[in-house]
Image (cartoon, rainbow, N blue to C red):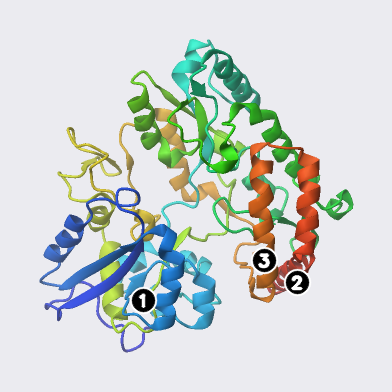
């Protein structure tokens, strides 16, 4: 039941008193966002006789955001909506408003429709709704993009296995001396290649844990017992085989070693300076890691380099290749969140703004794509395109993952190849997903925060070598394991095991 301060919806009969919402997003202009003010002013124009709300949006460069948003919360700065990177800590410290009363509430019909009770429950923190979950699908299909025109040139079939990829990259290395066969992904060239987290979690009940950053530098694996009621094994990178004895044979030590040995096998195809992340030399690439959501952008990038370029995409995980229902592992958690400081004096007005954003496709589109007719055009009910003659590099761009994304309000780019469209539609289908056995569990790192910090430093040192295939795998793992032990990884393993067992016991 809503309390007395949540009584009005977003379409009142009378005009509200004027209010300005102070909103903080992160990003760099022309990187994360571009030409966004016209959309904000259009919102104000459309709602001047109802919500009567102005938006004061301040952007903070991503490199500075973590430090600055921690200072905002400790100083009680006048902020009404922001992106909480330190979500668990903020929630525990009591600096975030509990927004539970605004969801599943008919007085906020936009929020009620867009955020199901299950979706909200899956994203509670310490049992409360301290943040608004922001995601449009619970995956962005991961895979490899490749120059399909070169594949045809060599008389090869579409890539459908790692052996196919290897043979293609071999041809590129032999015949295209001015190209990098496989582009690096930061300083970890192969990122998530040679893994299948969906099969690992759903079939093997094995879960990687405790990493930070992107990619997550996980260093502990946990095996859940077949009956789902307890932890059967915990092991860290480089631990002896005896520590992995209780793991599923396919998703424990063999899985880990295959990932690193395959990286070693493919190492000859990546830039030599991958580890320093300075490989952006302007040389063209024949393949690389990509999510399916990045297809149009990658296609445009490659055609700008070579008008004859044609792009193909191969999903690296088996269930994605087959588009099998119920095989995408999820815990139902969003990738991103919005939050309101508990100190805000405009919580209700901020939630009315969010209710407006999620109340219709038209409202959502305004912030996602900009001004219709100028920045974008609708193609049917569920597709969109940039108008003819508009330069994508100068057009409106907004990071929807900070405000607008939602499973009920989605559009996909028009003109995708049929296969790419099918992949994209697959990830928006609810029956694609299955909750894994640890759905609802959140590890609280506070008891081992010092050990976590030290172990993550160790991962920063060694993981780029292992994921890019540089050096001897066994030697790197042995050195890493010694440093992890010295940093307190055994204490982390024990804490993780205890917390998971406690969660499974009350589940």
Q: Residue at x 33, y 20 (%)?
A: 307
The residue at which mark 1 appears reads as 102
Q: Secondary structure at mark 3?
A: helix
Give the number of the disc on residue 62.
Answer: none
- In space, the residues marked 1 and 3 are separated at their CA atoms by 35 Å
Q: Nearer the viewer, residue 108 or 215?
A: 215
Q: Residue at x 89, y 52 (%)?
A: 242
Left or right of 87: which side holds 222?
A: right
The residue at which mark 3 appears reads as 452
Say whether marks 1 and 2 touch (CB < 8 Å).
Answer: no
- Mark 3 vs mark 2: which is more N-terminal? 3
Say whether marks 3 and 2 touch (CB < 8 Å).
Answer: no
In the image, residue 355 sits, relative to residue 220, either above or below, namely below
Q: Residue at x 40, y 64 (%)?
A: 115
The label nearer to you, 1 versus 3, is 3
Quarter-wise, where is residue 417 in the image? top left
The label nearer to you, 3 versus 2, is 3
Q: Residue most toward the bottom?
A: 4
- Circle 1 packing at 10 Å, graded few (<14), some (14-19), many (20+), is many
Quarter-wise, where is residue 420 in the image? top left
- In space, the residues marked 3 and 2 are separated at their CA atoms by 16 Å
Q: Secondary structure at mark 1?
A: helix
The residue at which mark 2 appears reads as 498
């Amino acid at each position: 039941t809503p309390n007395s301060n949540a009584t009005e919806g977003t379409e009142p009969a009378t005009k509200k008193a004027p209010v300005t919402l102070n909103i903080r997003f992160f990003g760099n202009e022309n990187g994360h966002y571009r030409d966004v003010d016209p959309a904000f002013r259009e919102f104000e124009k459309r709602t001047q006789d109802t919500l009567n709300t102005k938006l004061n949006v301040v952007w903070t460069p991503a490199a500075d955001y973590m430090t600055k948003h921690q200072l905002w919360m400790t100083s009680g700065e006048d902020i009404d909506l922001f992106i909480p990177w330190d979500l668990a800590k903020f929630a525990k410290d009591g600096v975030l408003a509990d927004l539970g009363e605004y969801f599943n509430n008919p007085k906020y019909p936009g929020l009620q429709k867009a955020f199901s009770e299950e979706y909200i429950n899956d994203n509670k923190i310490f049992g409360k709704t301290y943040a608004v979950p922001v995601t449009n699908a619970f995956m962005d299909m991961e895979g490899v993009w490749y120059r399909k025109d070169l594949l045809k040139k060599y008389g090869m079939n579409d890539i459908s296995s790692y052996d196919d990829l290897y043979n293609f990259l071999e041809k590129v290395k032999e015949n295209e001396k001015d190209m990098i066969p496989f582009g690096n992904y930061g300083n970890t060239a192969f990122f998530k290649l040679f893994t299948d987290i969906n099969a690992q979690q759903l079939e093997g009940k094995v879960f990687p844990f405790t990493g930070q950053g992107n990619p997550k530098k996980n260093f502990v694996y946990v095996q859940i017992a077949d009956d789902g009621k307890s932890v059967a094994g915990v092991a860290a990178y480089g631990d002896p085989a005896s520590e992995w004895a209780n793991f599923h044979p396919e998703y424990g030590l063999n899985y880990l070693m295959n990932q690193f040995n395959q990286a070693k096998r493919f190492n000859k195809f990546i830039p030599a300076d991958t580890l320093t992340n300075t490989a952006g030399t302007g040389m063209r690439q024949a393949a690389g890691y990509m999510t399916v959501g990045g297809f149009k952008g990658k296609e445009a990038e490659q055609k700008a380099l070579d008008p004859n370029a044609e792009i193909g995409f191969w999903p690296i995980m088996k269930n994605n290749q087959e588009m099998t229902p119920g095989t995408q592992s999820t815990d139902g958690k969003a990738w991103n969140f919005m939050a309101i400081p508990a100190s805000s004096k405009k919580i209700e007005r901020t939630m009315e703004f969010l209710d407006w954003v999620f109340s219709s496709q038209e409202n959502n589109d305004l912030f996602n794509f900009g001004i219709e007719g100028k920045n974008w055009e609708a193609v049917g009910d569920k597709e969109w395109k940039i108008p003819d003659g508009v330069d994508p590099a100068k057009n409106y761009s907004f990071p929807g993952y900070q405000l607008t994304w939602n499973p009920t309000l989605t559009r996909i780019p028009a003109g995708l190849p049929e296969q790419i469209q099918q992949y994209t539609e697959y990830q928006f289908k609810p029956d694609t997903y299955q909750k894994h056995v640890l759905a609802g569990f959140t590890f609280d790192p506070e008891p081992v925060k010092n050990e976590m910090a030290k172990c993550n430093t160790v991962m920063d040192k060694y993981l780029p070598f292992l994921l890019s295939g540089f050096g001897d795998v066994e030697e790197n793992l042995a050195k890493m394991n010694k440093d992890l032990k010295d940093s307190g990884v055994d204490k982390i393993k024990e804490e993780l095991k205890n917390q998971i067992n406690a969660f499974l016991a009350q589940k």
